[in-house]
Each structure stands twice: as C-alpha cells, then as structure tokens.
Amino acid sequence: MREPLKGVAPSILAADFGRLAEQVATVLAGGAKVIHVDVMDGHFVPPITMGPLAVEAIAEQVHAAGAAVDVHLMIERPERQIEAFAQGGADSITVHAEATPHVQYALQSVRDAGCLASLALNPGTPVEAASELAGDLDMVLCMTVNPGWGGQRFLEHSIAKLERLRTLLGPDPAIEVDGGIDTETARRCAAAGATVFVAGTAVFGARDPAQKVKEIGAALTG
Ligand code: DX5
Ligand code: ZN
C-alpha cells in the first residue's frame, strides 16, 4: 500500500522545460514530497501538454528524493492511457469524473496498475459525483479553477465545496486542490479539509521556488 500524498505539489506545467531537471531538483530541495504532472490532450481541454515520456523523464529523480509523481490526466477516456503512465513511473493517477462514462473502471485500473487512484471534479461538478466511489479512491482532486491553463484566479466557492467534500468522504481520503493556489488560498483550503496543494505559477513564478514551497508548507500548519 502506497503512502497517501501530502503537502505542497509543485506543478511542472509552470516550470522552464529547458531546464526541467534543475527546476525539479530545486523544489525537491525545498521539501516538496509530490511533483504534479498536468497531462492535456487538446480535447478534454484545449491545450496539449505532456505524456508518459515527461513522467519517465522525472520519475527517477523524484523517487530518489523520496517524493511521488502525481499525474493529473485532463484527457478523454483516461482508462486507455493508465498503463502507459504507470509504466512511466507515476505514483498516483487522477482521472476526471467528466472525462469518461467508466469512472469506476478507470479508478480500478489505476489501483490494478499499482498506483494511488484519484478522482478529479471540475468546478461545476457536484461533490456527490464521488459518493458511489468512496471505496474505489485514495484521493479526490477538487479543481479550484477550470482545467486547462495555469495562472488562473482561485474560484471562491471552492471553499464551501471542500467542506462538503470532506463531510461526504470522511477523514481518510486525501483531498487535493488545484488552480490558483498560493500561500493564502492554500491556508484557507487546508482549513476547509484539503491535504494536498498543487501550485504552479506561485512556485515556479517565484524568484526562489524552493523558498516558496517552504512558505506555502508553513502556511498549512500555521
Ligand atoms: C490547470 C492544472 C494545474 C495548473 C495549476 O488545469 O491542472 O495543475 O498547473 O497552475 P496554477 O498553480 O498556476 O494555477
Ligand atoms: Zn493539475
């Protein structure tokens, strides 16, 4: 059984890909125990980003630091790609509730592949979308912006949604927030029940990304 994800999860979507290994090393040195990989297919969301090769490129480095590779699939029919990402070195794989009619099957396939299974909910998707799946998931990713781009503004109604989600799920599953997360929004999401905090722009846009990881991490406990 894998350890649940926890804490700040820098999103490499906002990293400089010309020096990806160096950027990943910086945030690992800052104490990040989760590296978030945003996979977009040009269908579920308009942009195309990275695939299993990107996961493979960072997996060894991340694992050597005792951290986890957290793959966020913003793609249609994610169940068809799970094996490839698991083989690339993913530790957790998130599928969107809106991306397939076979959500339970997708989550089951993630666990069968040896990874933590996570379900993402778009801002317009009610928390009840997770209610039949509590036994099939290790984490719920609550989108705090609409998926597709970094650098968007945090949606305020996410706080009340997180509180409903925590009540629905009980204390055990991890809850990840993703989009518009900085020191202040992370602190408020933590108070509402979130346990994993994806941050792209806030971390890699900072003058000192390692320091920013520490700063967001400190805000969660303080
Ligand atoms: C958005 C992605 C996010 C993105 C967050 O669709 O899922 O993970 O990298 O970026 P920021 O932290 O800039 O909002
Ligand atoms: Zn993401």
Image (spheres, rainbow, N blue to C red):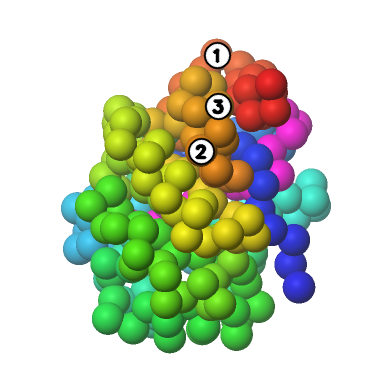
Q: Is the residue under label 3 in contact with that under label 1 (CB below 8 Å)?
A: no
Q: Residue at x 61, y 17 (%)?
A: 208
Element marked by disc 2: loop
Report which residue position mark 1 lands on: 207
Q: Amino acid type of disc 1?
A: Arg
Report which residue position mark 2 lands on: 192
Report which residue position mark 3 lands on: 187
Element marked by disc 3: helix
Spatial CA span between label 1 and label 2: 29 Å
Q: Give the total of numbered labels.
A: 3
Q: Amino acid type of disc 3?
A: Arg
Which span of residues is magenta-colored? 29-40
Percent position of residue 79, x then y: 40, 80
Q: Residue at x 35, y 64 (%)?
A: 128
Please tell me which residue lies in front, 215 or 121: 121
- Seen in the picture, residue 118 relative to 201 is either above or below; the reply is below
- Seen in the picture, residue 64 relative to 89 is either above or below; the reply is above
Spatial CA span between label 1 and label 3: 21 Å
> Which quarter shows the C terminus?
top right
Residue 29 located left or right of residue 35: right
Number of the label disc, if any, that sits on residue 91:
none
